Image (spheres, rainbow, N blue to C red):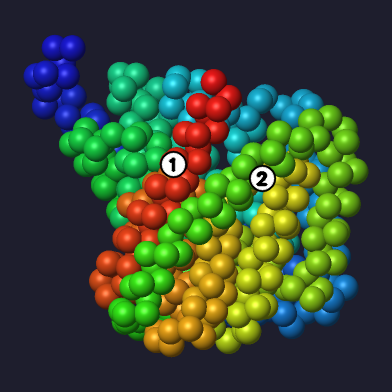
């Protein structure tokens, strides 16, 4: 307690050094994930430039099915062996409470996530760099002998910095640490979160220059979009709650024994078959998100793709795979927003479909994560959009998160 009230120079220097190393370590882990993922994607689908969708869309249909089938065999075998003979995988949240993350199991778990996503599995890739960043932060914290509170903060910073490095979103990564993992805004949390996320992003960009996750034309506010945002928020919040509950149900029924050796290859192959007519549903959601932001597909197709993405992502989770839902949530929200905005445009024209997709993506993701500030900043950094759409986005996010909160609270109260 005395040290916390009267910090010494040596304590400050040690904590600063550990924070610096956490940022560097998270940056290296994020870079490793990005390089490995890109290499696997290019090797699996035979392309050298562009995003995963470019390779998948030009690949013959059998190659999509084969890629997912191979992913299912590798993932099923790998996770079965890891869960049978390896140390139990420790989540970032568990590590923050004091449990140590076993290094070998953590690396294998992250590696399997990268492999299956690189081969086209319909799940997010962001969990792997978060786990690796948290594991590095935990080891550095234990080595430096920091307090339990400092260790908790640094592990959260490592996870957020890993996210920042893999997507080049320094502010979004810092807010992810503060708003989601720590749920505390103070100098003690904000300063290391900002520093580690910035350092990790710079480290990753020294090898892989920053590129936007989504290419979106400049967007402007219109009266039609403003009114739509106030109406669509509760609808998107309701849909987001449904997605979260389905995903949790899928996780609760996933195979926990040798059944994963059968279930995962079968489910992944089925997803590959679905990808023959709908290649946009493969991967972490970038393909669907870009389709929604570009507005080149009919609005009915975009709405259908969003629903199919929900099915393929929850099926992937239910098969026993580990991975994130952050970017799939963004893609689903963008698809729904483009479809709903397109329908709204028939009643009140005004504004491109991309603007509706932008607002809805932030709102849907804010509801699934229960983190409105993080969601807004992430979508801004993903698309490089300015403040023009902030007002309708904030209104839509407020409506969506309010419904999400009320539905969650109603469910808890009902059970109680």
Name the residue beneath numbered marker 2: 246
Residue 337 left/right relative to 175? right
Inspect this view and state whether residue 292 appears. no
Residue 410 left/right relative to 2? right
Q: Residue at x 43, y 84 (%)?
A: 348
Spot the residue most to the top: 2
Q: Looking at the figure, which quarter contains the C terminus?
A: top right
Q: Looking at the figure, which quarter contains the N terminus?
A: top left
Q: How many marks?
A: 2
Name the residue beneath numbered marker 1: 405
Quarter of the image where one finds residue 4? top left
Of the two numbered discs 1 and 2 on the same chain, state the one appearing first in sequence: 2
Residue 173 left/right relative to 82? left
Quarter of the image where one finds residue 192? top left
**Picture disc at residue 216:** none
In-front residue for pair 287/363: 363
Q: Residue at x 84, y 39 (%)?
A: 260
Residue 280 left/right relative to 379? right
Secondary structure of the residue carrying numbered label 1: helix
How many C-alpha atoms fall within 10 Å of the one at disc 1: few (<14), some, or many (≥20)? some
In-front residue for pair 408/92: 408
Up/down of 116 relative to 247, above or below: below
Inspect this view and state whether residue 318 appears. yes
Q: Position of residue 130 (x, y in %)?
A: 49, 44
Secondary structure of the residue carrying numbered label 2: helix
Q: Position of residue 343 (x, y in %)?
A: 54, 79
């Amino acid at each position: 307690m005395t040290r916390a009230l009267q910090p010494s120079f040596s304590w400050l220097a040690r904590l600063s050094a550990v924070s610096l190393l956490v940022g560097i370590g998270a940056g290296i882990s994020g870079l490793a994930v990005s390089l490995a993922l890109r290499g696997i994607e290019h090797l699996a689908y035979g392309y050298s430039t562009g995003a995963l969708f470019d390779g998948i869309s030009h690949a013959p249909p059998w190659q999509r099915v084969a890629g997912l089938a191979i992913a299912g065999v590798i993932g099923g075998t790998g996770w079965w062996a890891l869960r049978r003979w390896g140390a139990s995988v420790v989540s970032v949240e568990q590590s923050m409470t004091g449990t140590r993350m076993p290094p070998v199991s953590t690396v294998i778990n992250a590696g399997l996530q990268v492999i299956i996503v690189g081969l086209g599995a319909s799940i997010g890739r962001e969990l792997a760099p978060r786990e690796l960043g948290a594991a590095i932060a935990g080891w550095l914290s234990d080595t430096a002998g920091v307090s339990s509170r400092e260790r908790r903060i640094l592990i959260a910073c490592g996870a957020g910095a890993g996210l920042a490095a893999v997507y080049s979103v320094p502010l979004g990564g810092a807010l992810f640490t503060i708003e989601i993992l720590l749920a505390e805004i103070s100098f003690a949390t904000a300063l290391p979160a900002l520093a580690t996320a910035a350092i990790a992003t710079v480290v990753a960009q020294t090898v892989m220059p920053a590129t936007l996750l989504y290419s979106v034309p400049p967007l402007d506010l219109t009266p039609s979009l403003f009114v739509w945002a106030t109406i669509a928020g509760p609808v998107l919040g309701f849909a987001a709650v449904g997605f979260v509950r389905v995903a949790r149900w899928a996780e609760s029924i996933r195979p926990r024994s040798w059944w994963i050796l059968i279930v995962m290859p079968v489910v992944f192959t089925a997803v590959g078959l679905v990808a023959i007519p709908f290649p946009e549903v493969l991967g972490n959601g970038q393909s669907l998100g870009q389709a929604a932001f570009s507005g080149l597909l009919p609005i009915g197709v975009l709405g259908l793709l969003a629903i199919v993405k929900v099915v393929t992502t929850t099926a992937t989770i239910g098969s026993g795979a580990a991975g994130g839902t952050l970017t799939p949530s963004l893609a689903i929200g963008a698809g729904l927003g483009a479809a709903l905005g397109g329908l709204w445009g028939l009643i009140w024209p005004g504004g491109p479909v991309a603007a509706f997709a932008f607002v809805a993506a932030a709102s849907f993701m804010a509801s699934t994560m229960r983190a409105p500030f993080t969601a807004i900043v992430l979508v801004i950094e993903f698309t490089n959009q300015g403040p023009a759409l902030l007002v309708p986005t904030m209104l839509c996010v407020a409506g969506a998160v309010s419904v999400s909160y009320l539905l969650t609270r109603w469910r808890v109260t009902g059970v109680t």
